[in-house]
Structure formats: C-alpha cells, structure tokens
Amino acid sequence: MQADAIIQRSTPARKVIPIVPYSVKGRYRNIKSIILNIAFAVYFLLPWLPWHNKVGQALLFDIGNARFHVFNLVLYPQDLMVLMGVLVIAASLLFISAAMFGRIFCGFFCFQTLWTDAFRFIEKWIQGEAQARKRLQQAPWDARKLALIGSTHLLWLLLALATALTFTLYFAEAGTLLRQVIAGHAPVAAYITITVLTATTYVAAGFAREDICFVACPYGKFQGVMQDPSTVSVIYDQQRGEQQLGRKAPTAQLKTPQSRSEQGYGDCIDCGYCVNVCPTGVDIRKGFQIGCISCGLCIDACDNIMDSLKLPRGLIRFDKDENLQPALAGQNTPALAGQDKKAKQDHQQAQKNRQWMRWKRAAYAALLLGSIGFTWHAIENLSPYTAMVQQQRQPLVTQLADGSLRNRYQLRISNKSGVTETYRIEVHGLPEGSFKGWKQITIPAGKSYGSDFSITLPAPLAKSTSQFELGVVPSSQVQSRERFTVRYFSE
C-alpha cells in the first residue's frame, strides 16, 4: 500500500475535470452533516454569546489593546506560554490524527471541506441532484439557466459575506462593529478584511474546491509520509472485490456471494458509485491516493449497493492496511513457518515496524498529554498583573552636586484583572530615602501604566551596590506579590 502511495505521487499532473459529486445517504454522510451544523452554529453564534466578563462577549481578540478575551480568561502578549501551549496541543492532535486515522481531519473538520459542503448543499437545493446539474451545465443559456445559476451564486456570495463579516466580529464588540459596518463608519481594516475574505471564501468553496486539497493544502502533502500500515484509513478490500476474474455487474447467475465466489468474480459490480460520490473524484479501488480525504462517502455508497444486492457490507471500509496483509499483521501461522528465508526476514522486519509504530504513537500521546498539562499549569498560574522594570539608558549614571550617584528606571504594570487595582511599590536592601517616585499606583482593569522612579545613593555605598530588589504588591491580592532583582550601575 505504501508503494502504491509513492507510485500515485509520481504520476503526471492529473487532468482537471469539473467534479459534480452525487448525493449519498449513510452514517458517514450523517456524521459529516452533524459536524457541519455544529461547526456553523459555533462559528456564527459565538461572537453573539454574552458572557459575564469585562467585555460582555465570550470570545474577543482585541488586537488594538493587545489582549484576548476567552470566556473568563484574559490573555496578554506576556502570556506567550499559554498561546504556545495551545498551538502545541493543536499540532499534536493533528499529528496523532494523521498517524492513527489518516486524513480524517480533512474529511470531517477542515474549513475547506465544511464550507465546500455548504456551498454544494446550496447548489443542490437550487439546481437539483448531480444529474440535473450536469444537464444544466450543458444546456444553452436561457432565462431558466440564468435564474438557477444566478440565484446559486447570489446565495454563495451571501454565505461568503456572512462568513467574512462574522470573522471580523471576533475582533471587536459584535453589536457595535455590525452597526458601524452597516452605517459605513467601521474602520477601513474591517472593510478590507470583509472584502478579501468574501472573495477568497467564494472562490475557494465555489470554484477551487478539491483543487485546494490537491494543490494548495500543505497538510495533504506531508500527511502521506506519516501514514503506515497500522493507520486506519479508507481501504478497498481488493481480494474480496476482485477475486480471480475481477469485477462484474450482477446477473441472474451472479447475485449471491456464493455464486460470485464459485465463478471467480469479486463482490464489486463496477457500478462506479463510490467514484461518483467522492468530492475529490478519487477511485479508491486504485489504492491509496493523495486526493483521498477520508470522508467516508464512498463507504456509504458501497454499503448502499451491497445492501441492495444482499451482499455483506465492508467492501470499502475504514480499516488498517496491515489487516489486509497477513505478513504485516504478524500472524504466526503454520504457512509462515514453511516460507523461505526472505519471507521470514520480511516478517521480522514487519514486527520491528509494528514496534516502531507503537513507540511513535506513544511519543505523540506523551507530547499531547505533556502540552495539555503544561498549558493547564500555565493557565492556573497566570498572574493577575504583569510588571516590567527598565533602566533609563541615557545616561546610565548621573552624578549629583554632592557626589551621590543616581540611576533612573521605569516600572510598567499591566492590570490583567477585571477590576481596578492599587499596587504598592517597595524597595528592599537600600537605605531609607534612596527611592524617589510613586510609592503606589492605581490602574483600571485592562490598562497599562508606567511610573518613573530613581535610586540615589552616596558614592561610597553606590560603589559597593550592584543590585537591589523591587517589590510590587497588589492591594487586594497580596499573595500575588512579585520581587524583581534590578541592576544598579555606579559607573
């Protein structure tokens, strides 16, 4: 199967033929529809979900003020570890799904797949089933064709516009921004974003479709090398489907599994339904192909045909490649014991490969669990504020008339809590009166204030002082106090 994958990738560029997939009913089509409805509900409704936080919105990426509001959590650029942990979790999930279930993400959860499905539902609703759409494409232009195609593209544009507009609502207060957009008073960046996303969504889901998977998607390119014989993917049971004489349409003498097997024909009747329903036009009977997105629609199509012919289901199914190859499955059969030396070596190599696959999955799982634990720890230990001390560089040291030496600093505090907070500033390890500046500072919720201060020491003491400690203590959360070791320069 892996060799087949290499052969498929080395073939010349595919011939581009417009794909008009047939409709199909089945469990995987139902799962895809459920995921589509849930994904659209979450995407379009989440900006409007009220929440008891400062902004009153469950999810808000406030780029202007450099903070992300995620339900009750507020993340700042200083919380880089949390953001990095989330990215590592997402990457780990993608790698694990690719290693264990192939391109199942592409078939069920990818944005391109979801929006293309929605566009195709609109197309089917307006123009009819696949056969009717093909006839409409070949028909001469008249009022009916213009009305059907025009209304289809109008609804596509409306869905693309709604998608783009909703995207912008994640970056500002939803109600306010929507009113501004309608009234023509929104920021220019909002109109540019809406225009670009509307156009790209319309083109990608309405026209490019499967070409995005073949040409533009990087995940589809490297996913193949992550797949091994123990990866669960869409597989055609060639032995059962072909037997000795290949495929043959059912006749009066070829309607039961026994009769087909006795005459040397497989269960595949070569109806082509599995190809007709494929959104990327893949013929899964030719083996693993880079265009297969593991959506399972060909399984639904084949199962429906098998049911109608009273043949067993599972001719096309989600399965492991090793289950179709006893040598790779590591079966210790008497036949294996009698094989030649090369076959035994192949068997031993297969066993090593299986061991490597288990270790690889364990490593992925450890990475995922570690990143989840790291992110959870980072969230649980988020400070309600951040403080940063910087020394004024021009000049580093100032000598006063009495010979004492002064260093100047700036303390910047960002209040990440949801209430106004007063912070007390303390200096440790220096004599009384050496600190000149505000002893406390009050900062509203979500704001960042800076406070300049200086440290002045007599020359003898300054020569022997290389650092001191600065403390920041929030009045309402004394347990969150922080201490900073700050350099002091005497020359």
Image (cartoon, helix red, strand yellow):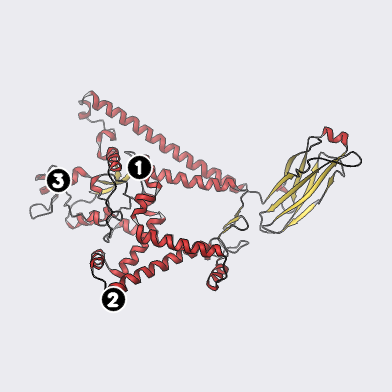
Residue that lies at the very extreme toward the right in this rendered image:
402
Q: In the figure, is residue 24 to the left or right of 118?
A: left
Q: Amino acid at mark 2?
A: Ala
Looking at the figure, which quarter contains the N terminus? top left
Which quadrant would residue 446 be assigned to in this image?
bottom right
Report the front residue among 460 and 44.
Answer: 460
Q: Residue placed at 23% from the left, 69% from the top?
A: 139
Q: Residue placed at 59% from the left, 48% from the top?
A: 379
Q: Which residue is mark 1?
A: 224
Up-down relation of residue 72 to residue 83 (above or below): below
Q: Which residue is mark 2?
A: 143
Report the front residue among 165 and 266.
Answer: 165
Which quadrant would residue 122 be assigned to in this image?
bottom left
Q: Is residue 55 visible?
A: yes
**What whole-number distance in Å separates the C-alpha atoms at marks 2 and 3?**
48 Å
Q: Which tag, 1 or 3, sits closer to the chain's start?
A: 1
Up-down relation of residue 47 to residue 441 (above or below): below
